Amino acid sequence: MKNAKKPLIKAISALLASIQIIALSSLNVFAINEELDDPNDDMVSQNEQKYDLLNENTDDWPNVSAAAYVLYDLDSGNVILGKNYDEQREPASTTKVMTLLLAMENLNMDDVVTITPEMALKINEIPADYVRLGLQEGEQITVQDLVYAGALKSANDACLALAMHMGGTEEAFCDMMNEKARDIGCLNTHFSSSFGFSNPDNLTTAYDLSLILGEACTNTQFSAVSTTYSYTIPATNKYSDSRPLNNANRFISSQEFSYDYYIGGKTGFTDSAGYTLVGAARKNDHTLVACVLNAQDSGIRYVDLRNLFEYGFSHYTTVQISPAEFDNAINQTNIQITDLLINTNLFIESEQTAFSEYLTTTSSRASLGSTNVVELSDVVIDTTQSEQTISVPLCRVYSDGKKYIVGILRLNIATKSPHIEVDPVKESGWTGLRNVLIVVAVISLLILILVISLVILRHSIVKKRRAERGRSKML
C-alpha cells in the first residue's frame, strides 16, 4: 500500500503546479487606452485663468482716462480689468518702487550711506527741475532716511545714492533692477534709471508695475513707509537742521482724494511719461493693485485708481482654495482608475496634488454656488507602458457652467510585483468565477483520484485474498 500511495501524492503535486501556471498566465497585460469622460469646452486652463476675467462683460467697466491701466488681484494673480496693460511705456518716478524694494531687501535701515565723489557727480547730472533732497558730497545719512525721502518726497538724489551704494554704479544697479524684475515675472520691463529719468530705454508696463508693487507691499516695509503722512530727517554732518518730509501722494496728504483702503504706492510724472500712479488697496482681507500710465491730469489719476478699486471690490470675489474640499473627489477617482486597472499588471503607486491658493471670479457667479470635480475628460491610461504619470485637473464648477482649474492631481502608475495578489474587494466577476471553477476542478480531480485509489486498493486486497485461498487448497 505504501507503494500505491506514492503515485497518488506525485499526481496531486503535479496537478497543483499545473493549476498555478494556469493562474499566472491568466494575468497577461493588455492595453485598454480608454478615455474616461466626455470633454468639456467650458473649462478654463490655469494659463488662461490669469486673463479670463477680461473676457467678461465690459459694458459697466469704470471710465478710466489713462492711456494704459490695469487692475490686478494680488492674491490670485488674476488680471481683472485692463487696457494696453502689456504695452511698454515710461514709468517716471514709479520706477522708484523697484529701487526702494531692493534697498529694503538688501540693506539694513540703520546702515549709514556716505555720499562719495562719484555719487555727487551723478547727482549733479540730475536735471534741475527734478525733485531733490539736497545731498552733499561727504554727507553721511542712514538708509532709512534715504528710503523715506524717496518714497514720500520722491527725491531723485536719494534713490540715486541708494542705487550706487548697492551697485557701485547706477548701471550695475540697473542690472540688479532688471534681474529682480525677471524674478518677479515682469516680461516687458527694462530699467536704465534708478529714479525714473525721462529716457526711452527706461520702460515698463502697467501690469509689470503692479507685480513690482505687489512684491514690495508683500515682502518689505514699503506699505508702511509709503503711507506715512510725514517723516523728519534729523541733522547730518552736512546739515545742522532737520529736514521734514510730507507725503506728496494725495491718497495720503489730501481729504479730496483720500481713500480708506489704500495701503501703499507711488506717483510719477515727466513730460514724456505723463502722469503715472501705481497703488494697492486692501478690503476684507482682499488685496488689489492698480496702475495707470500716461494719465492726462494729476488729479484724474487718483480718481481712476479709486474707481478701479471700488469696481474690483464690489464686482469680484477672491476665495481661498482648501485642498481638503477635494479629498472625496480624489478618493473616488482613485477607485475608478484602480477598477480600470484591475485586470492589468499596473497599479497607482503614488499620488501628489498641487493647488492654487486663491481663485478670483465675479461676485454674481460666486453667489450661485459651486461644486468641486475631478476632470477626467482627457485622461488616457496606456497599459502597455510599465510606468507613466497622468495629470488630472481638479476643478471648481459654478452653477452657470464656468469651470476653473484650481489644482492638479498627479498619479504615478507603475508595474505590480510579479506575484499573485488576491483582493476580494477588487475582483471582477470573471476572476471570481474563474477561481470557483478552479476550486471545483481541483476537488473533483482529488475525488476522482481518491476513487481510483480505493478501487486499486480494493482490487489488490481481493487479489491477495484469492492467492491466500489458493495456497490453503494446495496444502
Image (spheres, helix red, strand yellow):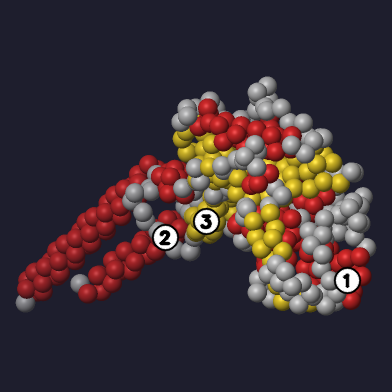
| 69 over 448 or under it: above or below | above
Looking at the rendered structure, the kind of residue marked 3 is Gln
Residue under numbered circle 2 = 420
Q: Is residue 114 left or right of residue 423?
A: right
Seen at 50% across and 58% down, the residue is 350
Cβ–Cβ below 8 Å for labels 3 and 2?
A: no
Q: Quadrant of the N terminus?
A: bottom left
- Secondary structure state at the residue bearing disc 3: strand
Binning the other alpha carbons within 10 Å of mark 2 as few (below 14), some (14 to 19) or many (20 upward) gives: few
Q: Earlier in the sequence, mark 3 or mark 2?
A: 3
Q: Position of residue 359 (x, y in %)?
A: 56, 42
- Secondary structure state at the residue bearing disc 2: loop
Looking at the rendered structure, the kind of residue marked 1 is Ala
Q: Position of residue 300 (x, y in %)?
A: 74, 34
| 459 over 69 or under it: above or below | below
Q: Is residue 195 left or right of residue 392?
A: right
Looking at the rendered structure, the kind of residue marked 2 is Ile
Q: Position of residue 183 (x, y in %)?
A: 73, 59
Q: Which mark is residue 412?
A: none
Residue under numbered circle 3 = 352
| 61 over 331 or under it: above or below | above
Mark 3–mark 2 distance (CA, rounded to whole Å): 27 Å
Residue under numbered circle 1 = 120
- Seen from the viewer's position, the closer of residues 11 and 4 is 11
Q: Earlier in the sequence, mark 2 or mark 1?
A: 1
